[in-house]
């Protein structure tokens, strides 16, 4: 499965959801499909995309948060899985694209290439719903189930270690940050108005 | 009975509440026990207990962008552990991060294992260009926390307050 195809297959589901991605291929590929103001790309601070997602999910229980993570990033913050499980935000879906490598810095293999199982680690950390998917059909099915489950899910999508030719896009980091904050503020006001 | 000051912890806690803090992330250490219990007992506070301090930078960044004011409670060694996300997260993305850091290893420190971090904390804050102030007297806690918060929001940058022995410890 290609990560780009996986992202394309569920892109329409992201329209009214709060999306946080890691840096590198995930950010560049999601932008290549089409940037939206409800997408935030954490272009550094590796490991903390799921922590940001937790902060948003706790601050805004009315919203549904989707985090697109990676194996290299999750391995830098395995303790964060225990914090996610502890607070169990039911409005958060945590997707880990696992290409078993640090693709954007030369493709060096990570520990998932030698058997570390991130879905099993997430389950053992206490995440109530976990899955590992290897095909596009299984990915879209599992993602839709997670969106409808009303509980915290960590799903690992095994993808090929290929990505875009470059990672820098024309969206500046601060432009993205303030646009995203305004999006979140606008949805809060919309809720209050009702 | 712990010599950590309950009364002064309450002064700090009340000042954080008054400045609009609704989420605290914390990793327990001796000086923070009362503050953490106060957050735990407060139905209007979201307390996030961390496995490692750097998670707190991400959680606070997310909470800020989502419109909720937060603070991080940590020891200075936790600050040392958080430096990458402070730089490559909170500073890169201009996040007004309020950090309350227990200043272990100052004059009067009795635990040998806490002594090394005390000597580097202020120098690192200077090096990172993080504005900071000392909380060492209950009289100035409330206005220093309020002013720190004001600067964090006007500059969109991290700020720090060092919880000092004279405030936190009764001996």
Image: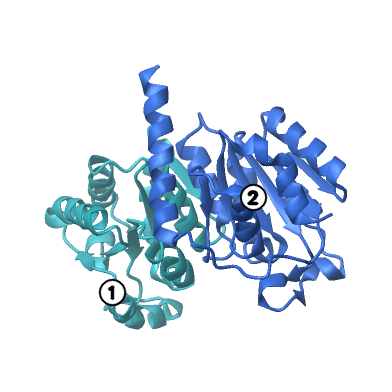
Chain colours: A blue, B cyan
Q: Quadrant of residue A111?
A: bottom right
Residue at which label 1 appears: B129
Q: Position of residue A62 (x, y in %)?
A: 50, 29
Q: Are marks 2 and 1 in contact (CB under 8 Å)?
A: no
- In depth, the one of A118 and B28 nearer the eye is A118
- In depth, the one of A74 and A189 nearer the eye is A189
Q: Position of residue A49 (x, y in %)?
A: 57, 55
Circle 1 marks a residue in which chain?
A: B
Q: Dot 1: what SS? A: loop
Neighbourhood count class around disc 1 (C-alpha, 10 Å): few under 14, some 14–19, many 20 upward: few
Q: Dot 2: what SS? A: helix
Residue at which label 2 appears: A33
Q: Tell me the quarter of the image containing the N terminus of chain B.
A: bottom left
- In depth, the one of B34 and A53 nearer the eye is A53
In the rendered structure, the answer to whether residue B25 lies left or right of residue A23 reads left
- In depth, the one of A166 and B45 nearer the eye is A166
Same subunit: marks 2 and 1: no
Q: Position of residue B54 (x, y in %)?
A: 50, 63
């Amino acid at each position: 499965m290609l990560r780009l195809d996986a992202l394309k297959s569920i892109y329409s589901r992201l329209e009214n959801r709060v999306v946080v991605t890691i840096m590198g291929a995930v950010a560049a590929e999601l932008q290549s499909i089409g940037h939206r103001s409800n997408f935030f790309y954490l272009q550094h601070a590796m490991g903390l995309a799921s922590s940001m997602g937790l902060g948003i999910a706790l601050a805004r229980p009315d919203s549904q948060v989707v985090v697109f993570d990676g194996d290299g990033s999750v391995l830098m913050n395995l303790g964060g899985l225990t914090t996610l499980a502890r607070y169990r935000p039911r409005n958060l879906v945590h997707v880990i694209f696992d290409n078993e490598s640090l693709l954007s810095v030369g493709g060096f293999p990570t520990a998932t290439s030698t058997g570390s199982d991130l879905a099993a680690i997430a389950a053992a950390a206490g995440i109530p719903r976990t899955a590992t998917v290897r095909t596009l059909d299984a990915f879209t099915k599992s993602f839709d189930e997670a969106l409808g489950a009303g509980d915290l899910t960590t799903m690992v999508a095994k993808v090929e270690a290929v990505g875009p030719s470059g990672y820098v896009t024309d969206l500046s980091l601060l432009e993205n940050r303030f646009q995203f904050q305004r999006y979140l503020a606008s949805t809060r006001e919309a809720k209050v108005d009702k | 009975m712990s010599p950590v000051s309950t009364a002064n912890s309450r002064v700090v806690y009340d000042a954080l509440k008054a400045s609009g803090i609704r989420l605290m992330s914390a990793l327990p250490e001796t000086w923070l026990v009362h503050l953490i219990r106060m957050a735990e007992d407060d139905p209007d506070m979201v307390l996030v207990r961390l496995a490692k301090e750097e998670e707190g930078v991400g959680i606070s960044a997310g909470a800020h962008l989502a419109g909720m004011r937060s603070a991080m409670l940590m020891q200075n060694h936790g600050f040392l552990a958080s430096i990458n996300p402070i730089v490559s997260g909170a500073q890169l993305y201009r996040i007004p991060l309020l950090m309350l850091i227990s200043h272990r290893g100052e004059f009067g420190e009795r635990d040998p294992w806490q002594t090394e971090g005390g000597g580097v904390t202020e120098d690192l804050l200077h090096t990172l260009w993080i504005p900071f102030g000392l909380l060492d007297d209950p009289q100035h806690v409330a206005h220093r926390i309020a002013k720190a918060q004001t600067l964090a929001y006007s500059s969109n940058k991290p700020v720090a307050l060092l919880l000092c022995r004279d405030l936190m410890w009764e001996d």
